[in-house]
């Protein structure tokens, strides 16, 4: 007698127990601690915080450990936790002009007030595997301290262009309530604030590919890296009962301001346009990709024809979230045998109909039809 | 369904609210659900939350269930008609853990049934609610990918294109070939995706006494069919809607009426046909019904080997 | 076929459309009677396509009105209608044949479904009848019925245009807009298509507005002619009169610059 397969609790529990074992690996090797992940895999932590939309290095490190280094899975863990947190409200806008800058470069000017500051960067490393790291490494020699501290004033490069009116002005409407992508469903066409929120938590790989596509002519927008800066900014919050802002945290962010294709009309003289990218931590590739895609998505507002994928907001925004994408791609693993059965019934019926109509056409009195 | 806020009962997961979602979120989902009930078949956008289960795995259904479930409720969860498929087990575990409610495999005993891909064979009653998990709520999506455009098509009842799709199937295959997620029109107004249930189940939706709720988490939509509401499957006068049928009966309970799954039993393609609704099948067997227990050999395929020249 | 005793089918009054500070078309007025074919000629940038979009309900004008004599309620300003009403009108009593068949056809469904769509949109629910209508109209536009289940993608440019025409005429509209219906086609294909359009329009008594840069097209199809330049109508009259005895210097230039058809 056939007995139907039972999935059941036991199978799930055993699978999860195996997963835990695999995560731990060889127990003769020391367990990874969260401090190690935070300190030594800090860019992974930064990415998980950015796309997980939660600035918490400890939780991000825990998510990375629990996910066995699967970054998208770690982002998912952090998001699922984030969604359960109570909300107090929105912070004051952070002021990246007032950043304690650790890295700051501009590709549009040789020098700018405040100077170019390379900071910690892979940019000019020769990508040679460092075998001393494999042999447990040695503590790196201390970096020499600069003779003078960086300038207090570090104006944003776009503001320098602004003084000449060479770049479009952007100002927030402070009276307007901030749209919250995590609480409301996105409506199309989406405003720029909704788009930027979506891109900020969007998958780095997806945005990288889209940004790259604009450079290859799929929605070209002539970008210059006006400025990339990374460092610490204060987060301020105004509690209702106080009525004035108080500083609640200091966070690291990376900001990219692209200066793009100029525009002009009979009313407005030619001006450069902008694309904007911002991430938690140090996620430079993501910030730059985001800025390219932000600019591409402004095509309609700037009167450009929408021809390339990166310019198509329904295409970009509906597919940027890797938690959504990963879930839906992987849901194909779930049983679909009821639907497949329905297709089987249909295909068999169609084939049967063809067989029968062929059989009916057979006439033994006639010679076979000529070719 | 008792919707009063509850603290998690002692045996449920520490640190989380009853049924996982906070009360504020539940209220938001209930508001969307009420609007959905008031406009049968209309997709109501809602602020879908990130759930601890992956998108595409029932997050919409789970949020709807979590917002309507109360301590008095008895929950049944099925996937492909069965209570024991891993995803059904997993979602049941989730609610057992976060809400501590009673669960059941018996359709008749459940006050809420969350389902993926099936409607139970046993007719549902007015005191029950069925919650469907929906991967793609927009029946027009595969014809028109743009949300801005599909919303307009719904608003203006511009639905001719749905019949264009059916026309194409008849033109190419001689019949309507859509097997699951077969589009319906609700209350003579909105075209609605019934979720990927087989069309076999579509007639059950029509004038069902139970409230039918549909949750799409990833796509952030909720829609509903109120009790006793007309649900019509799209068709043509001369190609009326029909449902799947089998020459076989259930090998376990002998049912001639239920939706059958087929299980391959050997490497020669022998197949066993069994009820997809595991509770229905067991109830029948408990009542003394019995099937042949035998697999069916694969039918030889003669279509491809027709002599040349005869199909012209 | 033109019935000037009846009320005009379409009445365009003082129509202007500006883009920012630029003029698309300016101060255009005309009447179109049932069964009448009006040609609109001009070079690219003359405003003829803007005018067509405005009167076909695709682009709201900056000023002026477009009034259509509806079957039920008589003359109505199409931009004062609700959007559902206007869209219903556009898929029943009106037709639009686009220069680019991709705009006018559904490229991913068969020729038969393209013709049947308008019928299904207004409630036809009998497959056999819809199919019969598709066969009928594909025959009228001289298409090979063996192609009825093929995708428009596989058709030649001339066939795609004929399919567009069939798709529009299936609901028996009283007014059809055509935007450069023959441009981009080979000369011999053009001639056949024009012949077909002329035959159908006359036989069915359909009123048409045909926008083209090709004087040969309007000479063959249209009763009356409007010549546009810089967004304005510079000359307006019976086609033969305008072409044989052009009054405006710009029309004279246009006429002298083409070979006689």
Image (cartoon, rainbow, N blue to C red):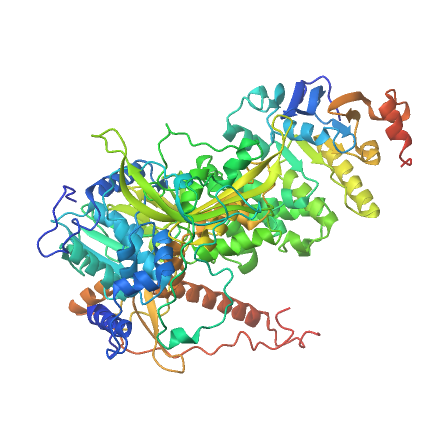
Q: Relative to residue C232, is residue C169 depicted above or below?
A: below
Left or right: residue C162 versus residue A243 is: right
Question: In this view of the protein, which residue sits in the foreground, A158 or A80?
Answer: A158
**In the picture, which quadrant includes the N terminus of chain B?**
top left
Q: Residue furthest front?
A: A147
Tell me where residue A156 appears, x and y as whole percent. Answer: 48, 40
**In the picture, which quadrant includes the C terminus of chain B?**
bottom right
Tell me where residue B91 appears, x and y as whole percent. Answer: 24, 59
Report the residue at 55% width, 20% height from top. Answer: C73
Q: Residue furthest left?
A: B10
Can I make out residue A21 in this image? Answer: yes
**What count of labels does the image hold?**
0
Q: Relative to residue A165, is residue B151 depicted above or below?
A: below
Left or right: residue A312 versus residue B50 is: right
Q: Relative to residue A136, is residue C61 depicted above or below?
A: above
Can I make out residue B119 in this image? Answer: no
Question: In this view of the protein, which residue sits in the foreground, C83 or A53?
Answer: A53
Tell me where residue C181 appears, x and y as whole percent. Answer: 73, 39
Q: Residue furthest bottom?
A: B267
Question: In this view of the protein, which residue sits in the foreground, B309 or A227?
Answer: A227
Q: Quadrant of residue B192?
A: top left
Tell me where residue A78 appears, x and y as whole percent. Answer: 29, 55
Left or right: residue C130 versus residue A254 is: right
Q: Relative to residue B254, is residue B295 depicted above or below?
A: below
């Amino acid at each position: 007698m056939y007995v139907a397969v039972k999935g059941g609790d036991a199978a799930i529990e055993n699978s999860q127990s195996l997963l835990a074992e695999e995560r731990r690996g060889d127990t003769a090797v020391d367990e990874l601690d969260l401090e190690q992940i935070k300190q030594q895999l800090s860019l992974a932590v930064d990415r998980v915080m950015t796309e997980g939309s939660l600035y918490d290095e400890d939780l991000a490190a825990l998510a990375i450990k629990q996910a066995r280094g699967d970054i998208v899975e770690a982002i998912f863990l952090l998001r699922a936790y984030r969604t359960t947190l109570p909300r107090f409200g929105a912070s004051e806008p952070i002021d990246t002009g007032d950043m304690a800058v650790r890295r700051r470069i501009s590709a549009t000017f040789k020098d700018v007030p405040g100077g170019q500051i390379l900071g910690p960067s892979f940019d000019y490393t020769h990508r040679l595997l460092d075998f001393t790291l494999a042999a447990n490494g040695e503590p790196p020699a201390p970096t020499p301290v600069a003779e003078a501290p960086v300038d207090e004033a570090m104006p944003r490069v776009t503001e320098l262009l602004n003084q000449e009116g060479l770049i479009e002005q952007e100002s927030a409407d402070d009276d307007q309530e901030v749209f919250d992508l995590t609480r409301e469903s996105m409506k199309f066409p989406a405003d720029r604030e909704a788009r930027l929120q979506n891109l900020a938590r969007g998958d780095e790989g997806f945005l990288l590919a889209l940004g790259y596509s604009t450079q290859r002519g799929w929605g070209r927008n002539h970008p210059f890296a006006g400025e990339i800066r990374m460092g610490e900014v204060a987060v301020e919050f105004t509690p209702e009962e106080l009525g004035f802002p108080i500083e609640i945290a200091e966070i690291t962010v990376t900001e990219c301001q692209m200066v793009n294709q100029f525009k002009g009309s009979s009313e407005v003289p030619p001006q450069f346009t902008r694309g904007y990218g911002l991430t938690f931590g140090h996620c430079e590739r993501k910030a730059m990709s985001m800025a390219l895609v932000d600019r591409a998505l402004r095509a309609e507002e700037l009167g450009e024809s929408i021809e390339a994928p990166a310019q198509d907001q329904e295409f970009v925004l509906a597919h940027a979230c890797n938690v959504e994408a990963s879930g839906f791609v992987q849901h194909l693993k779930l049983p679909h045998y009821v639907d497949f059965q329905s297709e089987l019934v249909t295909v068999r019926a169609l084939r049967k109909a063809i067989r029968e109509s062929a059989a009916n056409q057979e006439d033994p009195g006639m010679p076979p039809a000529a070719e | 369904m008792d919707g009063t806020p509850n603290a998690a009962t002692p045996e449920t997961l520490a640190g989380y609210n009853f049924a996982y979602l906070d009360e504020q979120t539940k209220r938001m989902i209930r508001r969307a659900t009420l609007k959905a009930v008031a406009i049968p078949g209309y997709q109501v956008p809602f602020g879908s939350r990130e759930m601890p289960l992956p998108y595409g795995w029932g997050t919409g259904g789970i949020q709807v269930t979590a917002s309507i479930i109360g301590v008095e409720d008895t929950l049944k969860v099925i996937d492909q008609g069965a209570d024991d498929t891993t995803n059904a087990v997993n979602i049941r575990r989730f609610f057992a853990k976060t809400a501590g409610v009673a669960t059941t495999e018996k359709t008749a005993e459940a006050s809420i049934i969350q389902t993926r891909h099936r409607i139970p064979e046993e007719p549902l009653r007015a005191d029950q609610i069925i919650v469907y998990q929906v991967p793609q709520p927009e029946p027009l999506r595969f014809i028109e990918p743009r949300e801005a455009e599909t919303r307009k098509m719904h608003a203006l009842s511009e639905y001719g294109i749905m019949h264009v799709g059916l026309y194409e199937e008849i033109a190419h295959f001689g019949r309507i070939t859509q097997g699951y997620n077969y589009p319906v029109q609700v209350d003579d107004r909105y075209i609605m995706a019934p979720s990927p249930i087989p069309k076999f189940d579509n007639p059950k939706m029509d004038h069902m006494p139970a409230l039918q709720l549909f949750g799409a988490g990833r796509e952030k939509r909720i829609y509903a069919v109120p009790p006793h509401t007309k649900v019509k499957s799209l068709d043509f006068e001369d190609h009326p809607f029909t449902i799947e049928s089998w020459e076989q009966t259930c090998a376990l309970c002998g049912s001639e009426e239920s939706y059958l799954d087929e299980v391959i039993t050997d490497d020669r393609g022998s197949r066993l046909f069994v009820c997809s609704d595991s509770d229905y099948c067991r109830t029948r067997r408990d009542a003394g019904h019995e099937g042949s227990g035998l697999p069916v050999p694969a039918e030889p395929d003669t279509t491809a080997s027709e002599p040349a020249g005869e199909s012209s | 076929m033109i019935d000037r005793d009846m009320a005009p089918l379409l009445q365009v009054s003082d129509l202007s459309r500006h883009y920012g500070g630029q003029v698309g078309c300016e101060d255009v007025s005309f009447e179109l009677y049932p069964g009448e074919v009006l040609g609109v000629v001009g070079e690219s940038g003359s405003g003829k396509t803007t005018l067509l979009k405005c009167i076909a309900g695709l682009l709201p004008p900056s000023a002026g009105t477009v009034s259509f004599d509806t079957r039920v309620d008589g003359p109505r300003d199409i931009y004062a209608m609700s959007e559902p009403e206007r869209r219903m009108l556009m898929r029943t009593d009106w037709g639009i044949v686009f220069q680019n068949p991709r705009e006018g056809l559904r490229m991913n469904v068969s020729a038969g479904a393209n013709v049947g769509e308008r019928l299904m949109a207004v409630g036809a629910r009998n497959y056999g009848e819809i199919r019969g209508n598709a066969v009928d109209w594909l025959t009228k536009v001289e298409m090979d019925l063996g192609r009825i289940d093929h995708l428009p993608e596989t058709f030649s440019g001339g066939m795609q245009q004929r399919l567009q025409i069939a798709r529009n005429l299936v609901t028996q509209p009283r007014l059809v807009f055509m935007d450069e219906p023959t441009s981009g086609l080979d000369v011999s294909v053009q001639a056949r298509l024009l012949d077909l359009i002329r035959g159908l329009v006359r036989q069915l008594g359909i009123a048409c507005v045909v926008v083209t840069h090709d004087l040969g097209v309007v000479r063959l199809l249209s009763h009356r002619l409007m010549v546009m330049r810089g967004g304005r109508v510079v000359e307006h009259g019976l086609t033969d009169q305008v072409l044989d005895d052009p009054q405006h210097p710009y029309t004279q230039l246009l006429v002298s610059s083409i070979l006689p058809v």
